Image (cartoon, coloured by chain):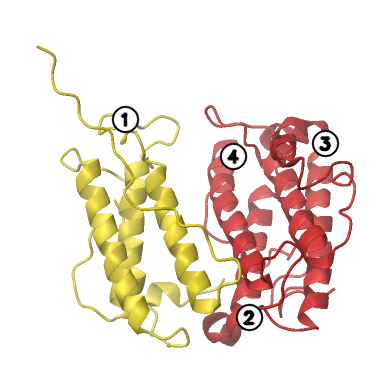
Chain colours: A yellow, B red
Amino acid sequence: MNPVPTPAFTASIHRASLNRLAGEREMLTRQLDFHRATLLHKLEGLDDVQLPADDWLGPESLLGVVKHLAGTEQGWFLKIYAGMEEPDLFDSEAEFLVDPDETADGLVRLYMRTCERAREVVATGGLDDVVTTPTSARSWPT
Amino acid sequence: MTGAVGFTAGEPPKWDVERFMRGDEVDTALITLERNRLTFSWKCADVDAAGMALRLGPSPMTLGGLLKHLAWVEELYFQHRLAGRAPMTPFDVLDLEADWADWADWAWRTASDDTPQALRALWTDAVHRSRTSLAETLSNGGLDQATRDGMSLRRLLADMIEEYARHTGHADLLREAVDGSTGEGAPGEFPVP
């Protein structure tokens, strides 16, 4: 009897077409959502065996990028902007590395949940709000 | 030539931290675009012909091809769509809209015909022309102004920032493969393209 194959990943968010005449807020938020969806569509049709493949990209596998961006969403929107005190999702030094017990499904769910929380925070804030950036970002822009 | 405040071609950027950190919509869009161009330029600096032609895996992308592709996008957006002007040579031989698919492949096919100096000069010339077109448009109004294909200037700038952000990521990986160089941003003395 053949083993049951792992279902291939299917991106579940829509790459909405962008409003070409949108105002500032809609343009920014839809642009961001468009790129969040684009990232997930790059995982489309791959399974867990293929996803962490380290060929020429080395440890920066597609899932490593998902982990990095989940951490970035949490860092900028939830912790820095909204001031939420919660532990980092991942160790920033190792977030491009995928552990053997991490699955595509689990990491993508975590990423999408974090994006949803970020959307909620942005929706209640103002574009001119000023926040205190962490020490690591104070050397900006150079 | 007018770029975002503090970005003069050939000189290190003079960062206006107040406008970078807390600027209005126009400041934020222009400074972000210039910051991305600066990073892309740095990734392509001091790369020889072999480096310009290096490919990764099955992708046809190269640093030389990225310079040609982004020069073309600068001309398409800031000359054809924004200013209503003809693009410069060599982008003036095809219908930029009708021959989109052919042009999309053109940069990767033809980059190895040019020297690294010529590739960098082509892109830099296009950037200078874009700054002129943008300054002209902004002297007449804000980001709600319509461009020739129905998108607002706001949308055009967002698309252009996206274009650089995505391709600078490709350039990150290509440059690392060329000589091991990595890094997020150019050193402070690196000149504005």
* Quarter of the image with the C terminus of chain B in it: bottom right
Could one spot residue A15 in this view of the protein?
yes
Task: Give above or below for A28 relative to B118.
Answer: below
Callout 1: few (<14), some (14-19), or many (20+) C-alpha neighbours within 10 Å?
some
- Residue position for label 4: B179
Task: Tell me which numbered mark, 3 or 2, is placed earlier along the sequence.
Answer: 2
Between the residue at mark 4 and the residue at mark 1, the CA separation in whole angstroms equals: 28 Å
Name the residue located 23 percent from the left edge and 56 percent from the top edge. A110
Say what amino acid the circle numbered 1 marks.
Answer: Gln
Same chain for the residues at labels 3 and 2, yes or no?
A: yes
Q: Amino acid at mark 4?
A: Asp
What is the chain letter for disc 2?
B
Query: In the rendering, at what x and y percent does residue B38 appear?
Result: 66, 62
The percent coordinates of residue A100 (x first, y second) are 18, 37
Residue, far top? A1
Identify the residue under disc 1: A50
